[in-house]
Amino acid sequence: MRRALILVPVLVVAFVAAACGSGGPEQVVGKVEYVSTTSTTTSTTTSTATTSTATTSTATTSTTTTSTTTTPAPTTTTDEVAGAGALKWRTCGDGIECTTLEVPMVHDDPSEGRIRIALNRFAAAPEGRIGVLLVNPGGPGGSGVDLVEDMGWLLDMVVPGFDVIGFDPRGVGGSSRVSCMEDLDDQVFVLDDGEDPAALFELAGVISSACLEESGDLALHVGTNNVARDMDLIRKALGEEQISFLGYSYGSRIGAVYAALFPDRVRAMVLDGPIDPAEQISSVSAVQGRGFEDAWSNFADWCDVDASCGLEAHGGAEVAFFAADALLAEGDLPAGDRVLTRGEFQMGVAMALYSPYTWEQLGQAFTEVLGAGEGWIFQSLADMMMGRRDDGTYDGSQDVNYLVNCADDPLRPSQESFFVALDAVADTFEHFGPAFRAMGDCSALPESVDPLHVAPADLAVPALVIALEGDPATPMAWAHGLTDSIGDAVLITSDGEGHTAFLSNSDCVTDVVIAYLVDLVVPEDGWSCVEGEDLSG
């Protein structure tokens, strides 16, 4: 899905560039660069917007328990592993070690060359060590290396006993990267009523050609199946019989595929903010669109009763939205030393809906536009969504997003059928219709060489799927789809707002996740909680 897509599921905890690179000279396999990366940090503003929804759903965790076993850490830091290469760890931060692992670009044909996967770890104390916990923050395009740099210490504290392992999936960050175009105007992806949608197909062709030219064959081999295969080589290189996995958002798709391909190598698996594997980029999801519309409604309801929102003078959130949208439909607005387009405005609104902690900031953004004619807050929110850095360059996450989704999707619909479906979906979305109408497609790329593989998995311990009722990017309906596709999985829910739950937008699921990861306590399928409710009794 292309740079301006507002529907990219990404965990909103922190946005940072890759923490450590290869440490060696730049190397090339085909046209794939091994890039040394530098540390840059950007984080979301965490305004405290207090929300409360009055549902009454509570349940009790079951006590299906398997005792925790303690396993020693691998005895060497450099082990040759068949098909996986060697791991040579180096210190690259406070308590963090980094390395790289070479893997086949095409797993079925290693002669096609090898690519590099960037890894880091926050190691557990030897006493009480359980094993390894691989993590992925979502996307596609999110960096697991960045997640561990930001949160490895927290995960080590909350779920002790694990070597917390981050990795940049192929195409991402410090791994062998893909690239498409860096100079697109975000506005071109917002299609107003009356505009010719054929222009978007022409643009898709330009982008697809650029992806193939800049990224070579890797552009066709970044799909989730290959990410899961890379994960298993990581497991081998770590010297572990099994892994535990924590996947946020798109990471839930990675986990589902890994479970299908390597079920006996899963110790435990937490899938937070689940994506239904039946959803493809070509299907133009009405479910996700409704998720964003519902999230806007929840924000508007809060804004109209909470003075910290600050939009009472502008008639409330609904009036403010359409007033700002009308201004931007007439022309761009100043945004510091840049200008805010209508497309960036809609992306900024969507970005703020990823967490209730940015709701207050969203109110401030409307106040700046309507009161001062200044759009810098919306601009900064849109930049977070798109992975735009302060120097004007992009982190490439949206290029990865587009190519991964197209690699996973076997369908290449016709222009006519795609836009009939698009219009049918977009016309039902009052606030985000133009952006939904402009969603990208894969028609200009070659057919997928390795479509998404998800199948029922026979796991020793059922996977744990977590969903929030107010999640805009991965709505509740998708949670049921993912749970059913895995088969051996349980679903727990919270009435909370925002995208993903564990250590981000939900307190009440925390204890359940900790007990599951550390002691393999599996909650009852369908367990639910109400945010702010005391569950101790």
Image (cartoon, rainbow, N blue to C red):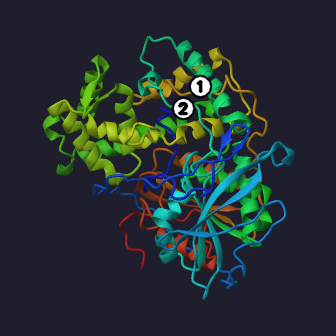
Q: Position of residue 311 (x, y in %)?
A: 19, 40
Name the residue that disc number 1 marks: 207
Crowding at dot 1, Cα within 10 Å, few <14 / some 14-19 / many 20+, comes out as many
Residue 295 visible within the image: no
**As rendered, which of 321 and 265 lies closer to the eye?**
265
**As rendered, which of 419 and 220 lies closer to the eye?**
220
Name the residue that disc number 2 marks: 2
Q: Position of residue 134 (x, y in %)?
A: 63, 64
Q: Quadrant of residue 81?
A: bottom right
Mark 2 and mark 1 in contact? Answer it, CB < 8 Å.
yes
Q: Earlier in the sequence, mark 2 or mark 1?
A: 2
Q: Secondary structure at mark 2?
A: loop
The residue type indicated by label 1 comes to Ile
Alpha carbon distance from label 2 to label 1: 9 Å
Residue at the left extreme of this rendering: 313
Residue 339 visible within the image: yes
Which is more foreground, mark 2 or mark 1?
Answer: 1
Relative to 375, 180 lies left or right? right
Specify the quadrant that holds the C terminus: bottom left
